[in-house]
Image (cartoon, rainbow, N blue to C red):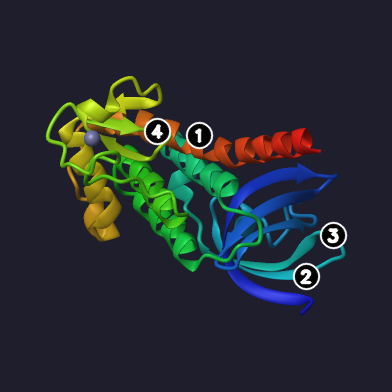
Amino acid sequence: MRYWKTEGVVLKNRDYKEADKLLTIYTPEGKVSAIAKGVRKLKSKMRGGTQLFTHSQFVFYRGRSLATVTQCEVLHPFTALRNDLNRFACAAYMAELTTELVPEGEPNKELFYLLLTCLHLLQNYPPGLVTRLFEIRIINLLGYAPELERCLSCGREVQDKIQFSLDQGGILCPHCGKGQKLSVNISRGALASLKALGSMDLDKCCRLKLSAAHERELSVLLGRYIELRLEKPLRTREFLSLMNNSAE
Ligand SMILES: [Zn+2]
């Protein structure tokens, strides 16, 4: 199949050669790197459909190394996200998370529709709330769901002085959390919001009341949790190669 047609969201868009762009597009079938030829010329018909965050219908041609965009038609331009700095920053962060966390060539329809839904929500709902919603959902969909119900270590329900273990991925009671370097405090309110964001219907989530303090708390916690997850596979590989080398 040299030509294929699919919808997609533009995650990255860099200038390439004189008039082309090199795009990273997220589709339900996975990430696609593709060249859009002549797209920086004013009269190019593909200008609109290849803008950052735009949801378009694409036709790709599979070349020897990279794919080429041969046609594209805008389905949703998300103009509001490019005209508001705060919303733009949140959309860029969601695009980066998708680029970095999702393995190359891995189809994931649920994740594609999560990104698309969150970009739609980001136009009308508080950016911080939508971004926290996206973070917890992408973590859950990629298999990094943290334990939020009981202490990871002893299995007890935790009422207060709750710790969140960034490396073990979940909550700890004050006893089990003692001396854990990679754990942070999490308030009951923030934990309740995190649980709701991770489990409720997406359209109900955006009507949740998330206080500024809880939003900041979750922003720091989820950011650090994801950073650690991003490093983890690399560290494991390094560790493995170290072990292999020493065993030789
Ligand atoms: Zn415990």
* Amino acid type at image mark 4: Leu
Residue under numbered circle 1: 227
* Amino acid type at image mark 2: Tyr
Q: Is mark 1 within 8 Å of ligand 1?
A: no
Q: CA distance from mark 4 to mark 3?
A: 39 Å
Q: Is mark 3 within 8 Å of ligand 1?
A: no
Q: CA distance from mark 3 to mark 2?
A: 11 Å
**Residue 173 in picture, x, y percent from top left:** 21, 32
Res 18 quadrant in image: top right
Front position in the image: 100 or 93: 100
Q: CA distance from mark 3 to mark 1?
A: 31 Å
Front position in the image: 63 or 20: 63
Residues at marks 3 and 2 touching, judged by CB atoms closer than 8 Å: no
Q: Give SS at disc 2.
A: strand
Of circles 4 and 1, the one toward us is: 4
Residues at marks 4 and 1 touching, judged by CB atoms closer than 8 Å: no
In the image: residue 233, left or right of residue 111: right
Residue under numbered circle 3: 65
Of circles 3 and 1, the one toward us is: 1
Residue under numbered circle 2: 61
